[in-house]
Each structure stands twice: as structure tokens, then as C-alpha cells.
Image (tube, rainbow, N blue to C red):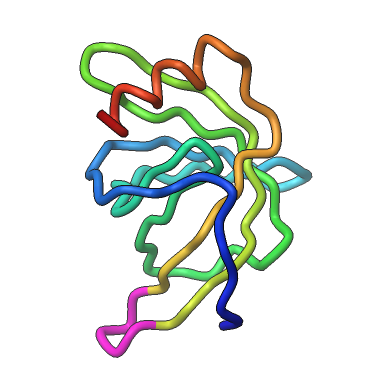
Amino acid sequence: MEDFKRRYPRVPSENTILLKKLGPSDVEIFAKTKVVGLGGCMFLSKESYGVGSYFDILISVKNSVAKAMCKVVYEIEQPDGNIQVGCEFININESDRKLLEVLLG
């Protein structure tokens, strides 16, 4: 993966998420984030979803839920067989963005 500078910092944070793949398939995935920032998140998965796939995502933050639309920007297979999935938030409203700021401290 190329070395690049992120627009928003990301911090380690385990939060329950629900992803619903957008498109003709009806795929819903529960997972936990490993890293979260204002620009996106990373989670581990047992399967590949495809770089460029779009999801609606719900992220549990304390006693609330932040909603966003995200795009898979990378998938990296891990030695244990899991796949590290990096998502960029491409549509998130201001109140949900502020909720994510709670995670950044």
C-alpha cells in the first residue's frame, strides 16, 4: 500500500458496526472497528467485499449511533486469514460527524 497522508487522523477504537452493502445484493455485516476517524474506519472481516464497494454504515458511539455512507478503499489479507477493510466516509451529516468527534477525544 502506498504511503500517504490522511486528511483526518484515526485512532484505535473498537465500536460495533452494522454495514449494509448497497446494490443488488442484500448483504448485512456486523463487525467491530479497529480504527476510527472523521474520514473513515477500518475493521476486520472474514470475507472480501471488493475495493470500490459502497455500504451504509451504523457505528455505535457510547449510547448513540452515527450513520454514514462509505466506500471500501482497501482490503489487506492478514496472516490469520482475516481481511483488513478500510472504508472512507463519503456521505456523513454534521451531527453524525460531531458524534464521531467524541471518539477522538
Q: Quadrant of the N terminus?
A: bottom right
Q: Residue at x 44, y 21 (%)?
A: 66
- Image spot of residue 40 (x, y percent): 52, 45
Task: Report the front residue among 98 and 49.
Answer: 98
- Image spot of residue 43 (x, y percent): 38, 56
Q: Residue at x 39, y 49 (%)?
A: 10
- Image spot of residue 94 (x, y percent): 59, 13
Magenta highlight on residue 67: no
Task: Report the front residue among 26 and 92.
Answer: 92
Which region of the structure is painted magenta?
A: 78-82
- Along the horizontal axis of the image, is 16 left or right of 87? left
Q: Work out whether 79 lies above or below 23.
A: below
Secondary structure that dominates the magenta span: loop
Q: Residue at x 52, y 23 (%)?
A: 67
Q: Quadrant of the C terminus?
A: top left
Q: Residue furthest bottom?
A: 79
